[in-house]
Amino acid sequence: MVSEKFLCKNGKELKIATIGPKEAEQFLKFMKQVTGETHFMSRYEDEVNLSDKSIEAERKRQKILFEDERQTMISIFDEDRIIGNIAIRTQGKSRKTDHRCAMGLGILKEYHGYGLGTLLMERGLDFAKEAGYQCVELGVLADNVAARSLYKKMGFEESGCLPGAFHLDDGRWIDEISMYKKI
């Protein structure tokens, strides 16, 4: 795991590092918390399982990512706790699509406003460029104003809208905005 320490805007020392199978349980705990804090994630908190079987499945999934030089997960840690994560995954392995990757970002609510999203996006984009991708894609819920603003600040453009892509338990339907950035 490649890692480095840095000072957050609030003065706290944090660590940013690539993660792999060893961090599977920590990652699932992070996902459980972040999905419980917002409807902006693709799952609900109760859909993130912390059973031994689920942790083992996550280890296997992360092993595949970790061993693929064109895919990664980069996390920010507060001591041993993951507080933010960005994933870069290939969109295809054929010559027609191997120039594209998808990006997904999440940060715990208590750490919003400290520039961690920008830092993770910068690291994710650097990784994507070094991995040889030419186009980075992501999806964001239409009502996620802060994320859309961050992505636009990072040079992403909106490319379309899937109406009603997310159906929430409270009955709301929310559109998903597709965004991309050429690198």
Image: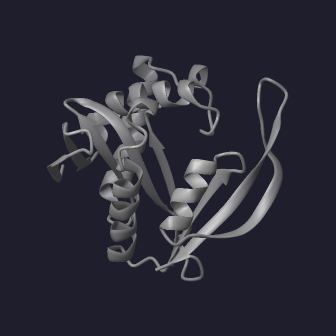
Name above or below for residue 46 compared with residue 152. Answer: above
The percent coordinates of residue 176 (x first, y second) are: 73, 52
Residue sticking out furthest to the front: 10
**With 19 as the anchor, is 136 left or right in this view?**
right
Q: Which residue is drawn at 17% across and 53% down?
A: 2
Q: In this view, does 151 lie to the left or right of 75?
A: right
- Please state the total of marks drawn on the protein image: 0
Residue 98 seen in render: no
Residue at the location (54% across, 61% down)?
Answer: 151
The way the protein has been coloured in the rendering is: one colour
Locate residue 119, reporting x and y percent: 34, 56
Residue 136 screen position, x and y as percent: 52, 70
Of 68 and 50, the residue lying toward us: 50
Q: In the shown orientation, is residue 89 left or right of residue 42?
A: left
Q: Nearer the viewer, residue 10 or 178?
A: 10
The reply to whether residue 36 is in sight is yes
Q: In this view, does 41 lie above or below 70?
A: above
> Position of 39 compared to 117: left or right?
right
User: In front here: 107 or 150?
Assistant: 150
> What is the quadrant of residue 112 in the picture?
top left
Residue at 39% in and 70% down: 128
Position of residue 145 relative to residue 180, above or below, is above
Q: Report the residue at 32% width, 65% height from top.
A: 69
Return the x and y of residue 182 as percentages of the image width and height: 52, 80
